[in-house]
Image (spheres, helix red, strand yellow):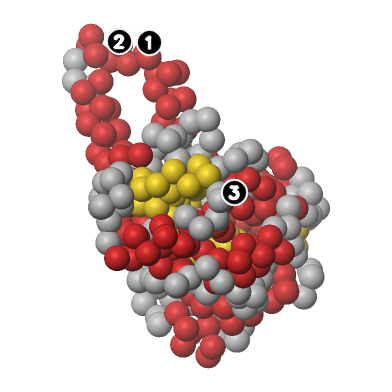
C-alpha cells in the first residue's frame, strides 16, 4: 500500500467527513494518508474519531482553500498555500503516491496543470468516470474537464480510456466507442466522425463504432469517449434518473401494509442493486493525462465515498501507466488529417 495526499478542505460537508473517510482507508485498507488543510479543524475531527494518534495518518497545514465561487485558475495561482495545491506538491515531491480531492473540479484541474503539468503529447487531460455495468464498469471520458473539443482530443480520450481499462481494470481487449446520437456511421457530428476517422487508422484497437446513450450502462462498450460537456450532461442525467427511480420505488414500497411486507422480502436484493449503482462504491474519478495520479471525488461525497476514492487512487498509483499514455497520444497525433 502507498500514501495518498487528501485535500481535507474539499467537499460540501467540511473536513470532518473527509477526515472520517481517510481514517477508514487507513484502518481498514492499510493505506497511509496525508490530510492537507486547516490543521486545527483536522485534528479536532481526528480527536472526535478517536484517531488523534492514528498510525499512518499525517497532517499538513495549509492556510488557504479554494471556494466554489472563485475562478479556479486565478485562485490556484494566487493561493499558493491552497490545500489542493499543497496536496499535489506533496505528490510531486515524492512524499505521496497519489492525491484526492472532493473540491471544485475546475480548481483540481487547474492545480494539476500548474503543479504537475501534462504528460508529453497529451493535448488535454480528461476526467475518467466509471459507470456501473457488467461484467466490468464502463469507462466514460471526458466527464467534465473540457466542455468543447477537437477530433484529436476525442481520439486521445478514447486511447487514454483504453489503456486505463486494460491496465487498471484488467479488461483484456477493451471495446471502444464514441458517444453519438445513433449507431449508424452517418450519425454524429463533424467532431465525432472526424475522431472516428482517426481511430479507424489503428488496426489493433477494438473499435466498435458509435455508442448510443442507452448503451452507457449496457456493457456493450468498455470505453466510451466524448467531449466534457456531453459526458457531464449524460452522467448527471443518469444520476438524476436513478435518484428519481429510487425515490419512486421507496414511496411505492411503503404505500401499504402488503407493500411493506413485500419490501422486507426483497430488501437484500434491492440493496445489492442499489450498492452496485451507488457512486460511493467507486469513490472518485481519475484525471488522466496529467503527470501524476490525481483523483476527483464528488462534492457530496460521504465518508465511505472518500474511503473508496482513496482506495482507487492508491490502486491506480501502484500501476504506473504514464509512459503508455504518452505513447498512445504521440501515435494518434501523427494520424490526424
Residue 137: x %, y % from top left: 51, 39
The residue labelled by disc 1 is 265
Name the mark nearer the viewer: 2 or 1. 1
Task: Give the CA separation, mark 3 to mark 1.
Answer: 49 Å
Task: Give the CA separation, mark 2 to mark 1.
Answer: 7 Å
Q: Are marks 2 and 1 in contact (CB under 8 Å)?
A: yes
How dense is the environment of label 1, judged by Cα within 10 Å: few (below 14), some, or many (20 and up)? few
Q: Residue at x 73, y 74 (%)?
A: 92
First-in-chain label (2 vs 3): 3
Q: Are marks 2 and 3 in contact (CB under 8 Å)?
A: no
Q: Are marks 3 and 1 in contact (CB under 8 Å)?
A: no
Name the mark nearer the viewer: 3 or 1. 3
Q: Left or right: where does residue 246 sit relative to residue 36?
A: left
The residue labelled by disc 3 is 204
Q: Is residue 175 above or below residue 252?
A: below
Q: Left or right: where does residue 212 sit relative to residue 70?
A: left
Image-quadrant location for residue 213? top left
Q: Secondary structure at mark 3?
A: loop
Q: Residue at x 28, y 15 (%)?
A: 260
Name the mark nearer the viewer: 2 or 3. 3
Q: Secondary structure at mark 1?
A: helix
Question: Residue 102 versus residue 8: which sits nearer the camera?
Answer: 102
Image-quadrant location for residue 299? bottom left
Q: Left or right: where does residue 44 sit relative to residue 213?
A: right
Amino acid at each position: 500500500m502507498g500514501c495518498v495526499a487528501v485535500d481535507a478542505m474539499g467537499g460540501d460537508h467540511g473536513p470532518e467527513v473527509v477526515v472520517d473517510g481517510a481514517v477508514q482507508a487507513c484502518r481498514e485498507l492499510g493505506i497511509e494518508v496525508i490530510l492537507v488543510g486547516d490543521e486545527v479543524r483536522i485534528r479536532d475531527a481526528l480527536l472526535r474519531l478517536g484517531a488523534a494518534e492514528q498510525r499512518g495518518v499525517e497532517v499538513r497545514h495549509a492556510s488557504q482553500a479554494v471556494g466554489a465561487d472563485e475562478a479556479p485558475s486565478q485562485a490556484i495561482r494566487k493561493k499558493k498555500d491552497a490545500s489542493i495545491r499543497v496536496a499535489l506538491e506533496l505528490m510531486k515531491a515524492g512524499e505521496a503516491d497519489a492525491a484526492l480531492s472532493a473540491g471544485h473540479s475546475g480548481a483540481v484541474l487547474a492545480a494539476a496543470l500548474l503543479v504537475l503539468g501534462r504528460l508529453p503529447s497529451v493535448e488535454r487531460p480528461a476526467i475518467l468516470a466509471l459507470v456501473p455495468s457488467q461484467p466490468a464498469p464502463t469507462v466514460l471520458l471526458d466527464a467534465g474537464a473540457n466542455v468543447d473539443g477537437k477530433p484529436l482530443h476525442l481520439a486521445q480520450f478514447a486511447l487514454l480510456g483504453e489503456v486505463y481499462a486494460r491496465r487498471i481494470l484488467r479488461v483484456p481487449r477493451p471495446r471502444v466507442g464514441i458517444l453519438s446520437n445513433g449507431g449508424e456511421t452517418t450519425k454524429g457530428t463533424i467532431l465525432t466522425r472526424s475522431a472516428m476517422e482517426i481511430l479507424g487508422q489503428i488496426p489493433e484497437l477494438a473499435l466498435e463504432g458509435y455508442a448510443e446513450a442507452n448503451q452507457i450502462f449496457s456493457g456493450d462498450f468498455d470505453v466510451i469517449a466524448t467531449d466534457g460537456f456531453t459526458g457531464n450532461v449524460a452522467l448527471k442525467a443518469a444520476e438524476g434518473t436513478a435518484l428519481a427511480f429510487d425515490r419512486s420505488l421507496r414511496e411505492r414500497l411503503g404505500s401499504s401494509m402488503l407493500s411493506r411486507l413485500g419490501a422486507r422480502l426483497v430488501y437484500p436484493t434491492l440493496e445489492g442493486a442499489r450498492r452496485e449503482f451507488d457512486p460511493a462504491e467507486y469513490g472518485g474519478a481519475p484525471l488522466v493525462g496529467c503527470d501524476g495520479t490525481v483523483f476527483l471525488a464528488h462534492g457530496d461525497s460521504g465518508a465511505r465515498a472518500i474511503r473508496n476514492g482513496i482506495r482507487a487512487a492508491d490502486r491506480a498509483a501502484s500501476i504506473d501507466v504514464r509512459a503508455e499514455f504518452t505513447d498512445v497520444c504521440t501515435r494518434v497525433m501523427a494520424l490526424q488529417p
